[in-house]
Image (spheres, helix red, strand yellow):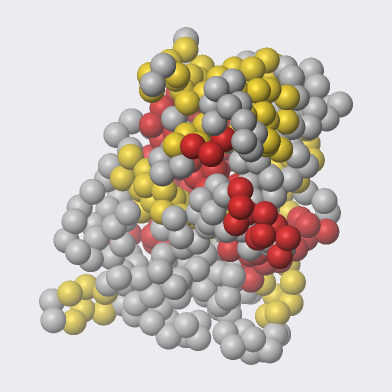
């Protein structure tokens, strides 16, 4: 089934995918509630907390998370590679003494292009008002048991399918102490040659009642950086003359997820926020962005600061603390479903086109070129779709299927008046994120 939204004689087309509807429907709010409740039961998950106890502290929490991933793998015939990833950190402001920062990683290996990765992450650790207080109860129900529960639930659902590319589910540690788990994972991935095309960092996906009094379970935010962190001086000079400030791979990843919300998640409108993260704050996608990998933060729209980083207490009739009663489990399931369909769509699609180039100065026509697919993906690629939009439009407005080629000319479409990009399409109609030409928009090889 094909859909189109007319725009000046052109259209945006896509193939509706029944499997993505099934994936969205399979996500369980009840299972997410059970997982969040279990994570809260460990009392505190502070990075510096107890590691020997079986019932309290971050050690018990990470062992339980690994056991859950192991169960999921057993249910799909061993389809997940589950392991701890760790590094000893010391001499840092928030980790002064030697501490092993341990994350839990589960890898669902792709069948066509296994070296291409899409990642969903949540953070294990929790905290109270004093970031160095590792003894007080820090339930961390929303921040960020919700993100870890989402990663576990996405693994349960997606492990029932096979994909062309590799999907990774990550429960990262050390976020509150300085984004250490993300840095460790990003650096190891770079060393191991992972071709990461997307990092979906889920940090607080369960709160629907904001500090501003707004209660809303129908919107979510996707934070995405603009100019890429690893841009060189030559890249910046080129971008000044050709554009790309709002077309980093992270921004086009965010646009892709926004489309998935529109197409597959009922009663959810996502806002792409043109910022790395909330104002002057950070999250675990940032270490990946620092190394040039596309990554975004997915989270609730309305935050409640009485529940974030707070000692458990009641003052002036206000209850402070990140407890279970502040989590809307149906909403957490909705955002988990958004992650799941986005991961599945990208993992079933071919790799985003590489080496995308554009020309057309002082011409009536615009020509795009890109690299042919790898030998591994040659039989998986059906063709390519060229996109363009007005330069002040936030989302792609027009598209054209151009066949299985590596060059296409849009006649009588002037390069000066639009931004352009290319997506790859599988034989089943699954589509990659759109790639803006040049280094500003490149998703890598």
Please provide percent x and percent y for residue 15. 51, 17
Residue at the image point whose x is 41% and y is 54% from the top: 273
Please provide percent x and percent y for residue 398. 47, 26
Outermost residue, right side: 375
Residue 212 in view (yes/no) = yes
Q: Nearer the viewer, residue 266 or 127?
A: 266
Q: Is residue 31 left or right of residue 116?
A: left
Specify the quadrant of the image occupied by residue 130: bottom left
Q: Is residue 394 left or right of residue 172?
A: left
Residue 296 in view (yes/no) = no
Please provide percent x and percent y for residue 232. 72, 63
Outermost residue, front side: 362
Q: Nearer the viewer, residue 236 or 67?
A: 236
Specify the quadrant of the image occupied by residue 99: bottom right
Q: Looking at the rendering, in which quadrant would you find the C terminus?
A: top right
Q: Nearer the viewer, residue 126 or 77?
A: 126
Total numbered labels placed on residues in the image:
0
Residue at the image point whose x is 78% and y is 32% from the top: 371
Residue at the image point whose x is 54% and y is 31% from the top: 414
Outermost residue, top side: 1
Residue at the image point whose x is 75% and y is 39% from the top: 355
Please provide percent x and percent y for residue 330. 33, 42
Q: Is residue 248 left or right of residue 108?
A: left
């Amino acid at each position: 089934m094909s859909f189109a939204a007319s725009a000046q004689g052109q259209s945006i087309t896509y193939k509706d995918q029944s499997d993505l509807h099934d994936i969205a429907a399979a996500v369980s709010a009840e299972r997410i509630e059970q997982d969040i409740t279990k994570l809260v039961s460990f009392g505190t998950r502070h990075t510096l907390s107890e590691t020997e106890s079986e019932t309290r502290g971050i050690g018990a929490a990470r062992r339980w998370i690994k056991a859950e991933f192991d169960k999921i793998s057993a249910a799909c015939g061993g389809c997940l590679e589950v392991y701890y990833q760790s590094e000893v950190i010391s001499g840092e402001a928030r980790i002064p003494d030697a501490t092993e920062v341990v994350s839990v990683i589960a890898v669902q290996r792709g069948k066509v292009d296994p070296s291409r990765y899409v990642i969903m992450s949540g953070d294990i650790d929790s905290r109270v008002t004093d970031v160095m207080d590792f003894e007080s109860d820090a339930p961390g129900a929303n921040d960020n048991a919700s993100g870890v529960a989402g990663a576990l639930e996405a693994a349960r659902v997606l492990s029932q399918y096979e994909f062309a590319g590799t999907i990774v589910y990550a429960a990262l540690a050390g976020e509150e102490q300085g984004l250490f788990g993300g840095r460790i994972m990003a650096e190891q991935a770079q060393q191991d040659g992972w071709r990461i095309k997307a990092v979906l960092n889920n940090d607080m996906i369960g709160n629907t009642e904001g500090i501003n009094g707004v209660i809303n379970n129908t919107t979510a935010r996707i934070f995405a950086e603009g100019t890429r962190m690893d841009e060189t001086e030559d890249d910046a000079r080129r971008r000044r003359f050709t554009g790309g400030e709002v077309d980093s791979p992270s921004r086009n990843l965010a646009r892709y997820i926004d489309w998935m919300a529109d197409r597959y998640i009922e009663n959810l409108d996502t806002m792409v926020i043109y910022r790395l993260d909330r104002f002057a704050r950070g999250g675990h996608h940032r270490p990946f962005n620092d190394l040039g990998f596309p990554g975004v933060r997915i989270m609730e729209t309305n935050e409640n600061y009485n529940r974030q980083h707070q000692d458990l207490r009641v003052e002036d009739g206000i209850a402070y603390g990140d407890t279970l009663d502040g989590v809307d489990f149906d909403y957490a399931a909705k955002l988990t479903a958004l992650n799941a369909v986005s991961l599945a769509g990208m993992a079933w699609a071919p790799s985003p086109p590489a080496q995308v180039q554009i020309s057309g100065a002082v011409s009536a026509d615009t020509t795009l070129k890109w690299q042919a697919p790898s030998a591994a993906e040659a039989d998986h690629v059906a063709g390519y779709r060229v996109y363009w939009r007005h330069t002040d439009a936030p989302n792609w407005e027009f598209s054209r299927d151009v066949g299985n080629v590596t060059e296409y000319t849009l006649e009588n479409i002037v390069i000066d008046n639009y931004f352009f990009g290319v997506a790859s399409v599988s034989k089943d109609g699954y589509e990659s994120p759109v790639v803006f030409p040049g280094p500003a928009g490149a998703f890598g090889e």
